[in-house]
Image: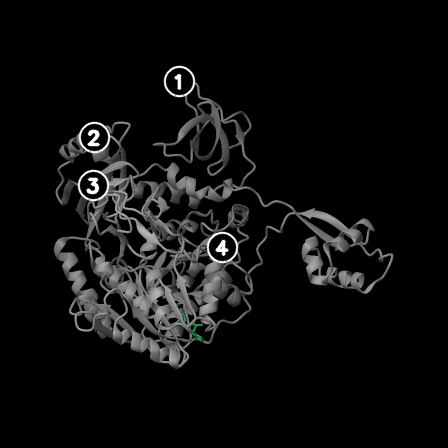
């Protein structure tokens, strides 16, 4: 009997399409195939194969089964689950899952090897080449460098037959982790946490633990022990460690390599496509057993996933805000469930969602109360900017400057934290008052002095800084308002002209290698003052860093969305937690205009529990996460009238349901982005409501005109 294959295509289409299976193709779920779509052949993945029953309309046949690895059942189920969760087309998460499969294969490289033929003229240089070549095959240029000879000599030796030239593809295999190696000797509370994790892993199946420990308590050491236990218990088991920032992946990769004597698979947007392909295939084959990566690593085709670690689980960077919208921590728990794997969520400042699950006993709660060894948490002091303001046009107050001077005099390091890229967040014309905005977006242009450009951080638009006001034409009238990291660096240089000062932001540290270099330079003590955005303020261990100055502690509280206080607390606890390691006590100074604010008081008193209890009470009263569910519905389009009509109809069509409130449509702070007007709805629902089903039913009630794009953001983190 003939069979039908349902094929999911990595595009935003509502469902899988049916194709006829050609005789003898023997398709199975997970197979990658080429299928006709319109005039083209396109890659897709078989999700189901079933017998054709009589009366089916004739279907186009599957064109070809591709010679690429099959997606394992868990990956396939996860992709479909994620799509339902996000109320999006399953082709969207599938596209992420196939990113590595579609990347180009690594290209063969040229290498030379000694043939055993002796050189015609045995000079000292030739002997050095032969000695260097004894180390094994290597690219000709590397051999020339190793032997300290010209590349011309290597070429001569190839011509003479002393060396043979081959084309080889880099070995796709990953070295297996060496499980005979011992980890660090754990202190008592680390050992207790590690044992609890090992017991959980030994019990098998899906379980979630919160590893809750102050910065520097050794959470990484503990979860590496859990990883070792998983890898040792089952020779096929795989481990995934997720991190919120590329800079952090670099530090953890080094620690994994140190612990297991083998580099893990590395997965993030900065990994070159051929290297990505290698990781993808090795993960699918089960030969890459540890992956360290950013959020999209969650979609890799693991065969035997035994453990997922989400480090810094509270971090907002786990939320993917464009394209397929998801939160990697939430999806990690879902994937753990599908794979019957253990999940460890690690943080010094866990999200309220995770704390709630720990409080109610759904997650195991493992606490590390103190820093490892003699290291102490830093003293945190508030600087009231109303009492001791900086001089006009400056951003560092006298008490902070004095503390920096003392720190520098002792030969220790300072970190100035300001979560704002560029030189100034606003450029204003003092003649006409115009604030310079991007042409097609409601967002101020940020001045970047290194490049001399004005940049829209929302869309990436940029232009040279004009000499005259584009609005009124006045010359020399543009003034820079407020500080970014570049401006704080300028001030630090003026104050400490002899200090070694560096800036760590995504503009100065643009790739993984640069991040690693900067972190190593800082850790080695070769920087005196580091001015940094959040890219450097999380997770790193800088042994000589004893002072953290937070330039604008109130920054994250402005605008005030649901998580503003929580996020500010987490970010500042992370940033201040960089100070003081080893035997040197640390200090953190927070510049604020609101020292009485609950967040500042909690940071100063190091009283996380009281802060969390107060936040929880407020959220519970309002029925907000983690006590209720939220979703945003964002409609956008270039045609203002069509958009207005659509959102009016959508508002009228909202199903009435007990326990669901629909707010909007409202004009968001960014009402225009890339020439498209935007409108937002916010949906709040009680926890027992199937919010995804509600949203899907609502959206289906009103057909959107072709110019209008509708985006659903389940559990929004951005309200802009
Ligand atoms: P966290 O992830 O909780 O911030 P880390 O695991 O990074 O903490 O540990 C902080 C520092 O203390 C690191 O330099 C780490 O190597 C060191 N450390 C932690 N636990 C131990 C231990 N048991 N033995 C030796 N060094 C440790």
Question: How far from the left and from the top, in percent, is residue 235?
Answer: 53, 58
What is the C-alpha distance between the residues marked 3 and 1? 46 Å
Disc 3 CB within 8 Å of nearest ligand 1 atom: no
Reply above or below: 112 against 494.
above
Q: Write down the residue under mark 3.
A: 680
In this picture the colour scheme is one colour
The answer to whether 309 appears left or right of 628 in the picture is right
Q: Which quadrant of the structure image shows residue 64?
A: top right
Disc 1 CB within 8 Å of nearest ligand 1 atom: no
**Label located before the other in sequence (2 or 4):** 4
What is the C-alpha distance between the residues marked 4 and 1? 50 Å
Question: How far from the left and from the top, in percent, is residue 92?
Answer: 38, 39
**Label located before the other in sequence (3 or 1):** 1
Question: How far from the left and from the top, in percent, is residue 257?
Answer: 52, 64
Q: Write down the residue under mark 1.
A: 55
Q: Nearer the viewer, mark 2 or mark 4?
A: 4
Q: Write down the residue under mark 4.
A: 266
Q: Nearer the viewer, mark 2 or mark 3?
A: 3
The answer to whether residue 53 is seen in the rendering is yes
**Label located before the other in sequence (4 or 1):** 1
The answer to whether 366 appears left or right of 167 in the picture is left
Q: Residue furthest front?
A: 475
What is the C-alpha distance between the residues marked 2 and 4? 44 Å
Number of callouts in the render?
Answer: 4
Res. 701 mark: 2
Q: Residues within 10 Å of mark 2 (few under 14, many from 20)?
A: few
Q: Nearer the viewer, residue 362 or 141?
A: 141
Disc 4 CB within 8 Å of nearest ligand 1 atom: no
Please name the residue shown 42% across and 46% down the image: 74
Question: How far from the left and from the top, in percent, is residue 238?
Answer: 48, 55
């Amino acid at each position: 009997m003939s069979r039908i294959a349902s094929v999911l295509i990595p595009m935003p289409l509502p469902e899988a399409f049916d194709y006829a299976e050609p005789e003898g193709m023997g398709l199975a779920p997970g197979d990658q195939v080429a299928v006709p779509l319109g005039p083209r052949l396109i890659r897709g993945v078989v999700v189901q194969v079933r017998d054709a029953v009589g009366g089916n309309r004739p279907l186009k046949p599957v064109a070809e089964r591709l010679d690429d690895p099959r997606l394992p059942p868990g990956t396939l189920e996860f992709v479909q689950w994620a799509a339902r969760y996000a109320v999006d087309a399953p082709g969207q998460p599938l596209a992420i899952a196939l990113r590595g499969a579609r990347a180009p294969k690594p290209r063969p490289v040229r290498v030379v090897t000694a043939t055993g033929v002796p050189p015609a003229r045995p000079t000292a240089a030739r002997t050095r080449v032969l000695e260097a070549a004894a180390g094994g095959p290597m690219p000709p240029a590397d051999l020339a460098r190793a032997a300290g000879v010209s590349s011309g000599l290597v070429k001569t030796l190839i011509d003479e037959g002393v060396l043979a030239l081959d084309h080889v593809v880099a070995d796709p295999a990953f070295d297996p982790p060496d499980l005979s190696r011992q980890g660090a000797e754990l202190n008592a509370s680390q050992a207790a946490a590690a044992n609890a994790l090992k017991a959980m892993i030994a019990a098998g199946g899906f379980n979630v633990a919160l590893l809750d420990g102050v910065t520097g308590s050794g959470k990484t050491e503990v979860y590496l022990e859990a990883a070792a236990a998983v890898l040792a218990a089952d020779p096929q088991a795989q481990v995934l460690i997720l991190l919120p920032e590329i800079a952090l992946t670099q530090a953890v990769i080094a620690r994994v390599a140190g612990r297991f004597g083998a580099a893990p698979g590395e997965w993030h947007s900065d990994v070159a496509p051929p290297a990505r392909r290698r990781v993808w295939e090795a993960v699918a084959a089960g030969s890459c057993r540890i992956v360290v990566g950013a959020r999209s690593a969650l979609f890799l085709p693991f065969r035997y996933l035994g453990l997922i670690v989400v480090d810094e689980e509270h971090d907002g960077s786990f939320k993917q805000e464009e394209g397929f919208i998801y939160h990697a921590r939430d999806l990690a728990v879902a994937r753990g469930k599908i794979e019957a794997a253990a999940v460890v969520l690690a943080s010094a400042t866990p999200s309220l969602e995770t704390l709630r699950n720990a409080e109610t006993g759904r997650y195991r709660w493992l606490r590390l109360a103190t820093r490892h060894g003699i290291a102490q948490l830093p003293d945190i002091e508030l600087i009231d900017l109303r009492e001791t303001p900086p001089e006009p046009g400056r951003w560092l107050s006298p008490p902070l400057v004095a503390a920096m001077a003392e720190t520098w005099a002792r030969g220790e390091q300072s970190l100035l934290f300001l979560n704002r890229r560029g030189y100034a967040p606003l450029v204003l014309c003092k003649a006409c008052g115009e604030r310079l905005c991007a042409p097609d977006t409601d967002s101020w242009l940020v001045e970047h002095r290194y490049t001399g450009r004005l940049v829209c951080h929302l869309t990436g638009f940029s232009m040279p800084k004009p000499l005259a006001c584009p609005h009124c034409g006045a010359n020399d009238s543009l003034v820079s308002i407020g500080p970014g990291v570049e401006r704080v660096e300028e001030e630090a240089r003026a104050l400490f002209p002899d200090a070694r000062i560096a800036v760590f932001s995504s503009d100065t540290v643009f790739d993984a290698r640069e991040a690693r270099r900067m972190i190593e330079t800082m850790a080695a003590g070769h920087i005196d003052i580091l001015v940094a955005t959040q890219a450097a303020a999380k997770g790193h261990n800088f042994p000589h860093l004893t002072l953290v100055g937070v330039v604008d502690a109130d920054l994250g509280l402005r605008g005030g969305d649901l998580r503003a206080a929580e996020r500010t607390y987490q970010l500042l606890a992370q940033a201040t937690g960089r100070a003081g390691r080893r035997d040197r006590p640390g200090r953190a100074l927070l510049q604020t205009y609101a020292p009485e604010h609950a967040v500042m008081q909690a940071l100063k008193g190091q009283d996380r529990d009281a802060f969390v209890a107060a936040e929880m009470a407020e959220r519970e009263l309002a029925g907000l996460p983690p006590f209720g569910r939220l979703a945003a519905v964002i409609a956008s389009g270039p045609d203002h009238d069509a958009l207005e009509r659509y959102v009016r109809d959508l508002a009228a069509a909202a199903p009435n349901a007990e326990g669901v409130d629909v707010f909007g449509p409202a004009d968001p702070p960014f009402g225009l982005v890339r020439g498209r007007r935007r409108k937002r709805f916010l949906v709040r629902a009680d926890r027992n409501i199937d919010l995804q089903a509600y949203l899907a039913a609502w959206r289906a009630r009103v057909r959107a005109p072709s110019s209008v794009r509708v985006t659903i953001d389940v559990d929004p983190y951005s309200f802009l």
